[in-house]
Amino acid sequence: MRGLARENRVLWVNSIGNRSPRATSRDVRRALDKLRQAASGLVQAEENLHVLSPLAIPYYGSSAVRRINGGLLGAQVRWCMQRLGFRRPISWSFLPAAASVAGRLGESLVIYHCVDDFTAFEGTPAAAIAELEADLCRRADLVVVSAEKLLRERRRHNPRTVLVRHGVDHPHFSKALSPELVVPPEIASLPRPVFGFFGLLAEWVDLELLGRVADRWPSGSLVLLGKESCDSSALRRRGNVHLLGRKPYGSLPAYCKGFDVALMPFRVNQLTLAANPLKVREYLAAGLPVVSTAIPEVEALGLCRIGRSHDAFLDELSSALAQPGPRPERSAAVAHESWEARLDEIRAHVATVEREKRFSP
């Protein structure tokens, strides 16, 4: 959206989520955060980029509630469009919940950009989400997906579905190669080898596998950066595991510089078979060797070591340690996969659809 905002005005509507909240302290905090954001109204985040945090009912099991949400979202988005002077905009949706408003705002074009199998997330009402998504796919002028599995499945609803894989902020992550960049003190003096991971620690991360990595190299270090949304107590009990929490995006190249090998330890299941993990290209842009479980989109990249079992994963880590740390040749291999290049791909698909619409009877 930042790329698009250089030449267009963009209204970004924050997610209302796919999962109904539960009576947990975490979900209560999330609900309060969303209410605070909604109270801010329409916010200009950057030049040409405006943000709305809408109010909606986070429940999808009832068609009546979905109709109410459609009315609420539609009213809020139309109000913002009026404030900003939008006429015949392109609506670009990333979540099935947008089905309640996409195509009903006087758009010139409707795009659905699917980057996950949303029915596979823990705690989501799978049947309701699948129904919303099928409706959104059918109504879209263009469906963009980020993985081969998503391409096959979404084409059942809309033949105008195209595959555009994720990009990477290469100039940012390649800073890990700079001699001037300082490794953060909290990992600079850790015993080596240092195995690193950044991202959300959630149900799709194989914590047992991470424990085996820590046990295989008891004199080394396992560094995990990111928010935790699952029970990581078994990892915390290991003295060579360092759970350091979320870090600012700007600091990630410095942490990468301190890693010997980067880890992509996702479980292989319905969710991850359709995933295209952003972090893999970011690790590579930082010049790191990457060892991954057998996630199809990581295999398709052809630049990572793949472990098809826990034992095989550990063996691949041993091999990766022959050339540890950031290397320019690994970074150069993904230099062409920028977000700008991906945006150009999407622009070309949009232009094709617009031509077809213009000349269709």
Image (cartoon, helix red, strand yellow):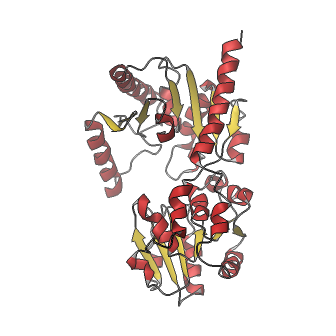
For residue 345, what is the image quadrant? Answer: top right
Specify the quadrant of the image occupied by residue 268: bottom right
Visible residue check, residue 359: yes
Q: Tell me the quadrant of the picture where the C terminus can be found.
A: top right
What is the residue that sits farthest to the bottom in this orientation? 219
Residue 167 point in image, percent of width and height: 60, 50
**Front in this rendered view, residue 163 or 258:** 258
154 is higher (above) or lower (below) than 324: above
Image side of residue 78 versus residue 301, left or right: left
Residue 21 or residue 48, whichever sits in front = 48
**Quick check: can you spot residue 203?**
no
Residue at x 46%, y 32% (from the top left corner):
62
- Placement of 353 over or under 131, stated as above or below: above
Between 25 and 5, the one lying in front of the other is 5
| 301 displayed left or right of 234 | right
- How many marks can you see? 0
> Which x, y percent locates residue 83?
33, 22
- Above or below residue 207? Residue 285 is above
Q: Residue furthest front?
A: 180
Horizontal and vertical percent position of residue 292: 65, 67
Q: Residue at x 66, y 17 (%)?
A: 357
x, y percentage for residue 148?
A: 72, 47
